[in-house]
Image (tube, helix red, strand yellow):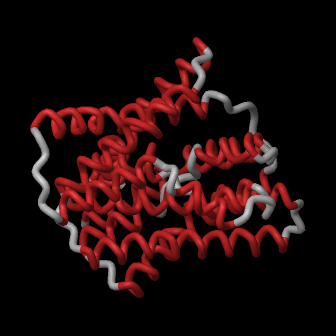
Amino acid sequence: MADLIQIFADNLLPILLIAAVGFFIKRRFDVQPRTVSLLLFNVFSPSLVFSQILKSKISGDEFIRIFVGTILFQLTVALIAYTAAKLQRTSPTERANLMIGSFCLNAGNFGLSLVGFAFNQEVFSRAIIVFIANIATNYSLGTFIASNGHESLSKSLGSVFRTPAVWSLVIALFVTNFHIPLPLVVTRSIDSLGNAALPLMLVLLGLELGQFGSFGQYRLVATGVIIRLLLSPFIAFGLGLLLGITGPALTAFVIQTSMPTAVLTIIFTTEFNLERDLALNLIMVSTLLSPITLSILIYLFQH
């Protein structure tokens, strides 16, 4: 028990405190999260991806295993959430909410920060790959589900290629594979922007949570949280073993796929007229309960 408390204090409490700063700022000054979100989406996150891929020593085979594994994981979780929603005879909007709340991982705001605190650079570099694959699935499958099929899957997939972090990944892989030297002024600028991404992600998490109203829709929220926090680690571990993901990659894969619901789901609910309160409840409850499950996972992987 003492070890778990220490893990929480060292790795999760700093995340919650930084997010609390954003929460306070939202409640006190009513700062709009969209401005911070746009900066992260277009500048800081792509810089973080680029700098980390350049520093990492990840083989192409391992990269593919992690990337494909993340997508397969999200598809599996989406299917489980769909089945659970059908059994509970939910409405189409509730079903869409539950599905995207279950498979959209907070692998950026929460995940990268936690992995950075709890593990070494090898694990962090591989966590970046999960983050990118998660973005690709969120902006394709997430858009398709949130629109209840009104957006074609091909159009939804097209949104992935308008994501700066994805292009940043492609360029970084090109530079790395062809050993293209970059001027120091470029690498230092990108590294500096990338270093600012993690704290800004956590402040944004707090700003988003600052919009929370009240708890409700307990049955659906409980279903989503069980899938997101309790079932996900077992699904990820099984998929990881099946795909031959081992060592630091397996640690990054399981930890990242066990994160709470992504704040991105709020954007989907606003854009496609889903139930915003349900999305906020899924985010808030899964975020508040995740330190328990994540502390246990970190303990298991560290020992």
Splitting the image into 4 quarters, where does residue 102 fall?
Answer: bottom right
* Above or below: residue 212 compared with residue 3: above
Q: Quadrant of the N terminus?
A: bottom left
Q: Position of residue 12 (x, y in %)?
A: 39, 44
Q: Quadrant of the C terminus?
A: bottom left
Q: Position of residue 78 (x, y in %)?
A: 65, 69
Residue farthest along the top direction in this orientation:
29
Q: Is residue 226 visible?
A: no
* Residue in view at x 62 percent, y 42 percent: 284
Q: Position of residue 149 (x, y in %)?
A: 79, 64
Q: Position of residue 239 (x, y in %)?
A: 45, 81
Q: Nearer the viewer, residue 59 or 24?
A: 59
* Above or below: residue 263 compared with residue 213: below
Residue 272 horizontal side relative to residue 110, left or right: right
* Residue in view at x 56 percent, y 49 percent: 262
* Above or below: residue 39 compared with residue 99: above
Residue 6 horizontal side relative to residue 84, left or right: left
* Residue in view at x 37 percent, y 49 percent: 112
* Above or below: residue 160 compared with residue 193: below
* Residue in view at x 69 percent, y 41 percent: 280
Residue 291 horizontal side relative to residue 27, left or right: left
State the count of labels: 0
Q: Nearer the viewer, residue 10 or 83?
A: 83
Q: Is residue 51 visible?
A: yes
